Image (spheres, rainbow, N blue to C red):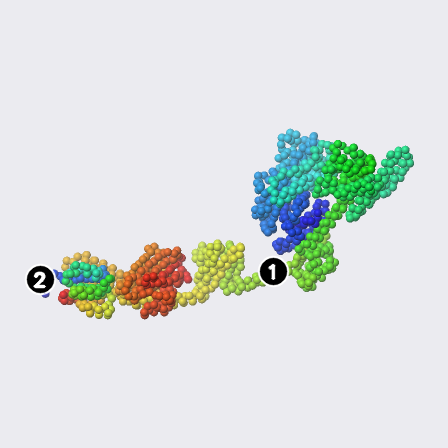
Amino acid sequence: MVGKKSVMNRSSDGPFVVRLSRGVARATLALWPLLLTLAISTPAMAADGVVPAIDETERPVNVLLLFAAPRLTPAQIVIDEAFRSTLTSRLSAPVYFYTEYLDLTLFQGDEPRPELRALLEQKYRDVKLDLVVAMASRALRFAVQNRADLFTGAPVVFAAVDRAALGEFALDDDVIGIWMNVDWAGTLDAALRLQPDTHRVVVISGTSATDQVWQAAAKRQLETDRYRGRVGIDYLTDLSVDQVLKRVATFSKGTIVLFGGFSRDATSQNVLGTEVVRRVAASSRVPVYGSSETYIGGGIVGGHVVSFQAQGVRAAELAARVLSGDRPGPADAASNLYVFDWRQLRRWGFDERRLPTGSEVRFREPSPWELHKWPVLGGVAVVALQAVLIVGLLVNRRQRRRAQRALAERLRFERLVSQVSAAFIALPAREVSGRIEKALAHIVEQLDLDRAVLAELDDRREDLIEVTYSWTRDGVGSIAGPVEKKAFPWVASRLQAGHVVAAARLDDLPDSAETDRRSLVALGTRSFVAVPLIIEGVVGGALSFSSIRVEREWPDELAQRLRLLAEIFANALARRRAALAARESEDRFRLLADTAPLMIWMSEPDGRRTYFNRRWLDMTGRRSGEDLADGWIDSVNPDDRKAAHEAYHQAVAERRTFTIDYRLRRRDGEDRWILDHGVPRVGEDGAFVGYVGSVIDITALNTALQAVLESNALRSAIFGSLYGQVAAIDRDGVIIAVNHSWTRFAEEGADPARGLAAGANCLAVWRQAAAAGDVDAFRAHEAVMAILNGKKEDARLEYACRSQTGERWFEMAVEPFRRPEGGAVISYIDITRRRHAEEEARRQREELAHAQRVTTLGELSASLAHEINQPLAAIVTNAQAAIRLLERQGVTHTDVSEALTDVAADARRASSIIQRLRALSRKEHAPQAGLDLNELIDDVVSLLRHDFQRKQIIVLRVFDPVVPKVAGDPVQLQQVILNLLVNASEAIAHSDGGRREVAIATAHRTPGLVEIAVRDTGIGVKEPELGRMFERFVSTKPGGLGMGLAISRSIVEAHGGRIRAIANPDRGLTLHVELPCDKTIAPRNGSPAH
Amino acid sequence: MSLAAPPPPLVYVIDDDASLLRALRRLLGAGGFRVCTFSSAEEFLESTKAATPGCLVLDVHLGGLSGLDLQERLVAAGRRIPVVFITAHDDAVTRERARRAGAVDYLPKPFNDESLIAGIKRALGDA
């Protein structure tokens, strides 16, 4: 049974613990601290998800047990063990039990502390849980509420859940389990059967949330018409334990106590219900009843108790079905039993016959073994004395032969019993088996019987009884192996109830034992006696003797003696079982320790090590003895020896938990960095018994850590040495890190965020400065927010700041901090030199443009002169006409007035032309926002009107009337238009014949862009010149300097646009200019923002 | 000089500048001439009024048919009409062309009223 499966457990601290059956728990207590240490080991290990190696190829089943309480209460221990052992036995796959104590009872409400919840989330994120088991209503509530987040996909099975405590809380279809019914009514009914004259009932319960569930159940069940008027019911709920004890001592006859859940008293003291009930029962002057099986044996009379054993078993059975894919509904478990304490029944003088049918009476009577213990111990001497008395009796009463024979038999048997007892008292467990057989043989011989059988109940097969020892006289058929209970139903039930069964003749058996009779006949039995074998308080088998050759009597004294014998055997068997279990558990521990993925040691209180597991020995390559005591220090690297030894012994002297790291020399001579973690062990009595330690090899981890440190150092070096000022911020704008340059930055002034120390929130600083009117701060804030919001992948902005060293220019660049938590990296670079270089280039470009403009205007001077002369001619003529009119008689003022009006208009006309010319020839000009391209073109066309006219060229203007405004330098843009129109007119002038037409169009077809197209019907340009025509000194026309288009391109590009030439399909060329629309934010500081 | 008042001599003015055209009408009107104005050579050619003898004050650079072209066209058509050229675009080439074509006068804009009237009178005298 053991060894077939690996039963592992991870509790809240993560340890894996071998769960032992009840009988052997005590034997292994001493080992538990060690097992606990396995988990405490290191966080790194837990994070790596190290799990013990499993031999089975079958995938283990991961089961998480959730307890609401902060620790195991007696009831929970029972349910926990029943559940684990049942589930383990039902599944073929290995089962990992993870256990969590939610501490819910320590807090109000159903939510555990947030840290615990976070811990759970982290712990089970990577665990594929197959099942979550919730014990009690609050754990269930937690499991259901959090399963989506914490235990995704795992079905939930519950046990010990009071349906009423769950209230209206809805359960999903895949949440099933066993309801717990705290049957106060059933218990009270049973009490009233025993004590019909009861007139007052006092219900005692504690103050914790769990206790209140019990109390609520009591009120629900007891405050009904059924009891009203018959008994008065009081509740003692808000008292300390001491107060409760005082009160129960005052109760008088006619009162009974019902004891319920009690895990915390009114002073908020956490207590054990089983302890409290023991004290209450001891102090009480009236009988105490209870509704939990765990209270039985603690001094209560009994009751219709919740069997947590049954709860655990049933829940595990459900769980097994769920895990196999079945989906049963929640079950109302018939998990309540009528259980009573025989001693209490006797104490209060209750009539056992008044118990409800099906009641189980425990602790029925002091066992013969207990009664006869001392006589038996002194057995041999006493028997000798008896023998003398009996011999005397025989001499005096010879005539009573039958009595004689009986007495002789009794004498033989007494001797036999004392021999057997003496033999068994100090018998080592391993010799028990052989000695039982010998004893059976001896009894058969001595009592002149034919067959002796010792049979034990099988835990796993309730329908079978296993014949474990038997002795048969020669010539009689033997019995071995399992016997079906149903072959002996009557005998089995009598034995189960603790009775001795004897039949001198099979005919003496009652009619209801017909089946048994037939089975006995089949075995050849003519006469038999069977005694229950009570092992650790429960019927665990039977001892039976039979006669086959003859029928014989089984006197009562014999039966009683057989009972004694059975008790001796039972005692030996119990010891043997305990020893087996202990060895088994030690084997299990060894197996676990040896297969654990880490090294383990144990020590004495003085620190001398007494145990190393296989992994340690494999590591050091030493024989098991060599590392013991302080020998292990020789396996440590000599350089670390002294420090490790001192640190170890100092920790041991202070009896504190320690973690030391040192290099352990591996068997191949290689040093391995290890982490040695020791925890003090405490024995059963709370005394310090030494240390248990776990050791892990962290060499790989160290190497990895080293690599991380190096790469961090490298990164930090790069970061620190950056010329620019760099800061990393989190998604809230808080500065996480800055480089050296940044910290020196504060002196430069300007951006209020610069020079802020890590921890400061730069967004807040910018917001504040922006509110105070700092435009740069506003822009910086916008740029960083755009990155943090993910709206932009990078953001750049330039601005100037004045410092003592003059005007400096900075470029601020913001990029996303590419990590899960988000954030941004901000850097500032001093771009003053670049800026100056750009300024210089721009100045040169403007000079060149100006020169080109003046040249072009010079070339146009004749036409321009015409344009000016025209109005001047009109002015002069008008003026002279006016004079003549005034000199003449009869002239109306109207004539003169009209002439003068025309004069003024023409003067304005001349003036505006001169202004345009002046504008175009000026060197200084400024960019403006909101420029209307159509107007700019009109101005240029008006200057060129005469030139086109002279060349007999028709100019078509195709304007988009609502073309968006552009931002830029109007003079430069007009220069571009001028150049394009002049080029077009010249291209036509050089052509021969055909249409002479220039079309200039504006359009807005693409969002954000404005287009100008100048189409001519001139001589055109062919490839490859088409591609080169924007280069300097490339001219396609005779006598051209080749500057116009080159300058036009530089102007257009400086405005963020582009220019290209396309040959028309018929004739001539079209020049396309694209310019960005005005973005309303004007470039600052006298320069385009590019 | 004349005893009886002869009908005022007719002066045809062709210029594409409307303002100048109005100014010339006022000036020449005040100077005692009958004035007939046209804003283009084509308009003049189509006009029946142009059949009346007179002289022509002709802008060299007109939209469409230029002044010089008109003069050549008239010569070619056998119409001998004296021409006083006016121009806002004075250059040697134009001046020479005008002279060769037999222009009575050639006046760069802006011109003096007396020069113009003298030119017109000379042209009318030629007529």
Dot 2: chain letter = B
* Residue at left offset 14%, top offset 65%: B127
Give the quadrant of residue B26: bottom left
Report which residue position mark 1 lands on: A705
Q: Amino acid at mark 2?
A: Ala
* Residue at left offset 68%, top offset 63%: A669
Front residue of this view, candidates A861 and A414: A414
**Location of residue A1039 with respect to A652 vertically, above or below:** below
Q: Amino acid at mark 1?
A: Leu
Which mark is on residue A902?
A: none
Q: Is residue A709 left or right of residue A983?
A: right
- The answer to whether any part of residue A151 appears in the image is yes
**Location of residue B111 with respect to A602 vertically, above or below:** below
What secondary structure is found at the residue carrying circle 1?
helix
Give the quadrant of residue A952: bottom left
Front residue of this view, candidates A467 and A162: A467
Which mark is on residue B4?
A: 2
How many C-alpha atoms fall within 10 Å of the one at disc 2: few (<14), some, or many (≥20)? few
* Residue at left offset 44%, top offset 58%: A776
Residue A118 drawn at (x, y percent): 58, 50
Residue A465 drawn at (x, y percent): 74, 41
* Residue at left offset 18%, top offset 68%: B102
- The answer to whether any part of residue A238 appears in the image is no
Front residue of this view, candidates A13 and A768: A13
Q: Is residue A862 left or right of residue A94?
A: left
Judge if badges 1 and 2 mark residues of a common chain.
no
